[in-house]
Amino acid sequence: MNKNVLISGASIAGPALAYWLGRQGFNPTVVELAPALREGGQAVDFRGETHLTVLERMGLLPELHRIQTGGSPMRFVDEGGRTLLQLPAEFAGGEIEVLRGDLARVLYEHSAPYAEYIFGDSITSLTETPSGVRVDFQSGVARDFDLVIGADGLHSNVRHLAFGPEGNYVSHLGYYAATWQLPNENYPGLKKGSVGYNAPGRLASIGADHRDPARAGAFLVFAASELSYDRRDREQQKELITNAFSGLGWEVPRLLDSLHQAPDLYFDSISRVDVDTWSTGRVCLVGDAACGATVGGMGTGTAVVAAYVLAGELARAQGEYRTAFTRYESRLRKYAKGCQAGGDRTGKFLAPGSATGIRLRNALLSRPLFMNGMLKLGDKVSSTVALPDYPADSSRVSR
């Protein structure tokens, strides 16, 4: 009953959900707009008992330990390069930190035996029928599914089609973030982790590539009211970044020079997603599409946990989606909102709005007692939900 499930998005939540649905006897199909798995990206982390329990049940821990970065210590410096604050690797890296692209690949490889993957296509319309959902694709194909799950991130296409305009659900938190790769030839002394420089409302940082010492990664954050720009126009985005950091010292001029040659720019607002109900009819949201926070909201761990619970509740309800969707949201909403709340503070932490704010942050985090308290709080927030042990079908090996 209701076994054929379409999942939009092949980053983190989508493949994790496809894995568990396949193990539970469902027939998942994953559609992804990109022509292939997205490589690269910033490091993401898992922390606390809840995250690690799901990874263990998926059988991923040995491989993730093998490819982990080892954490990313953060160092803040003044314009002359003098260290003002040093944060340990576990502050941002949790208990396991991996590159987003590596995690996406591992999840894809584990889920592929159970799922159909369609790359280079996207959903253009959803029409609910008495027996399912009629889905039209950008390619011109139309197919029928029993259920549709939006696992397609902050700017979810499924949420837009089934719930309404993005502006109803996504709140701008006052900051923008950008990342790109660059040659490491100008930074021969760059070691593991990142080093960053603050001016009021701005952070410019550079981090060593965990795999290739000839490469480095830039990460910039700046305060701004909501901007109007084309999400597909990379040159326009580069101009916005350049304008925001023009005139700053330290390594900023060289970072901006590298930006103009960067082919892989990521640029987005730091925002939060709030959806009153995570499902409507036969359509449900998971991960950032339901409760995302761009940076610092433990979105990766929450997505993996949510995928496990959603699949488990669908199996427990034998595909009766109304019951399953209600149980899934009831079990996870409070947990997800608690994790998500960290994203509200990320911009202000990384790029305080005043010189006084920068000095205060540095002074507080230089105190071991305060630092340890923040680390313990992060572990506690990420482990505030009890996970049912949903039995998977061990005989289900592939489609």
Image: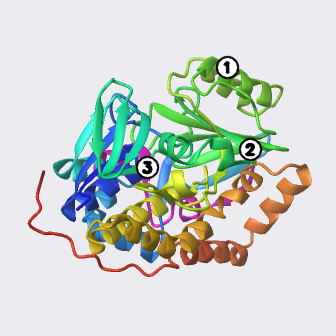
The quadrant where residue 85 appears:
bottom right
Q: Is residue 320 left or right of residue 272?
A: left
The reply to whether callout 2 and callout 1 are in contact (CB within 8 Å) is: no
C-alpha span from label 2 to label 1:
17 Å
Mark positioned earlier in the residue sequence (2 or 1): 2
Q: Nearer the viewer, residue 396 or 129?
A: 129
Looking at the rendered structure, which numbered label has been put on residue 236?
Answer: 1
Q: Does 10 appear in magenta?
A: no
Amino acid type for the residue under numbered disc 3: Ala
Q: Is residue 187 left or right of residue 351?
A: left
Q: Nearer the viewer, residue 144 or 38?
A: 144
Amino acid type for the residue under numbered disc 1: Gln
Which percent across, then down, holds residue 66? 30, 57
Mark positioned earlier in the residue sequence (3 or 2): 3
Looking at the image, residue 249 lies above or below residue 70: above
Q: Residue at x 81, y 39 (%)?
A: 225
C-alpha span from label 1 to label 3:
28 Å
Q: Residue at x 25, y 70 (%)?
A: 318
- Residue to which mark 3 is pinned: 151
10 Å crowding of disc 3: few (<14), some (14-19), many (20+): many
Which percent across, then down, holds residue 195? 64, 45
Q: Is residue 58 left or right of residue 332?
A: left
Q: Which residues are magenta?
A: 83-106
Which percent across, then down, holds residue 253? 72, 25
The quadrant where residue 240 appears:
top right
10 Å crowding of disc 2: few (<14), some (14-19), many (20+): many
Looking at the rendered structure, which numbered label has been put on residue 175?
Answer: 2
Q: Residue at x 54, y 33 (%)?
A: 188
Q: Does 87 appear in magenta?
A: yes
Which percent across, then down, holds residue 97? 45, 57
